[in-house]
Image (cartoon, grey):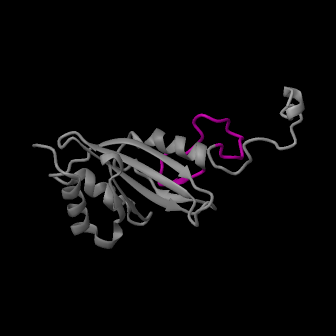
């Protein structure tokens, strides 16, 4: 089977899910679209199990924190179809207070550690995950280090004053 175009993938998704697929774009040739947490599992299952598309490889699950947005936590999925040599990116926006989304471990066992890492750094609860515990940070840590909730630098630091550098 040859390479399928991004437009063909998007058309197939639009035919099956309609309004549940939004903001389609192709930055750097990578088909990117958004959906909701209610629809993400159905879309992932469709992309994996469709006989033509065959997005059988979950490349990555991660998140991004946009504190200025109304839904500031964005979970990002990257899928790859080896058969068609095409990739897609799927984004799901969540609130920053108790962000929850269904697990992808029911489709890909490899999602287990990706979701644990995303939980560890962003505090996203993957509902139905078999062992959602911290993986890289200490267990008693109360913050999520990849969220942009703290200033980058203490403005009261005295060692950063200009007079220490001859200015």
Position of the N terminus, as image quadrant, is: top left
Q: In the picture, residue 56 is in which quadrant? A: top left
Instruction: Tell me which residue sits at (53%, 40%) in the image.
Output: 117
Residue 100, visible in the rendered structure = yes
- Asked if residue 132 lies in the magenta stretch, the reply is yes
Q: x and y percent of residue 155 in the render?
A: 83, 44
Q: Is residue 119 left or right of residue 155?
A: left
Above or below, 98 against 160 in this view is: below
Above or below, 152 against 71 in this view is: above
* Name of the residue lying farthest toward the bottom: 19
Above or below, 166 against 111 in this view is: above
Residue 131, visible in the rendered structure = no
Q: In the picture, residue 68 is in which quadrant? A: bottom right
**For the stretch drawn in magenta, what is the main secondary structure?**
loop
Residue placed most toward the observer, 25 or 136: 25
Q: In this view, does 52 lie to the left or right of 69?
A: left
């Amino acid at each position: 089977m040859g390479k399928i175009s991004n437009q063909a993938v998007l058309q197939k998704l639009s035919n099956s899910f309609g309004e549940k697929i939004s903001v389609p774009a192709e930055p750097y040739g990578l088909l990117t679209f958004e959906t909701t947490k209610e629809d993400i599992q159905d879309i992932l299952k469709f992309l994996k199990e469709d006989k033509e598309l065959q997005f059988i490889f979950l490349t990555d699950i991660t998140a991004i924190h946009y504190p200025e947005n109304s839904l500031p936590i964005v979970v990002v999925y990257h899928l790859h179809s080896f058969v068609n040599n095409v990739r897609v990116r799927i984004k799901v926006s969540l609130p920053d207070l108790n962000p929850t989304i269904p697990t992808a471990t029911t489709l890909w066992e490899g999602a287990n550690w990706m979701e644990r890492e995303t939980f560890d750094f962003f505090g996203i609860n993957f509902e139905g995950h078999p062992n959602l515990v911290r993986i890289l940070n200490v267990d008693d840590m109360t913050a999520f280090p990849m969220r942009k909730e703290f200033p980058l630098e203490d403005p009261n630091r005295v060692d950063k004053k200009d007079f220490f550098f001859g200015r």
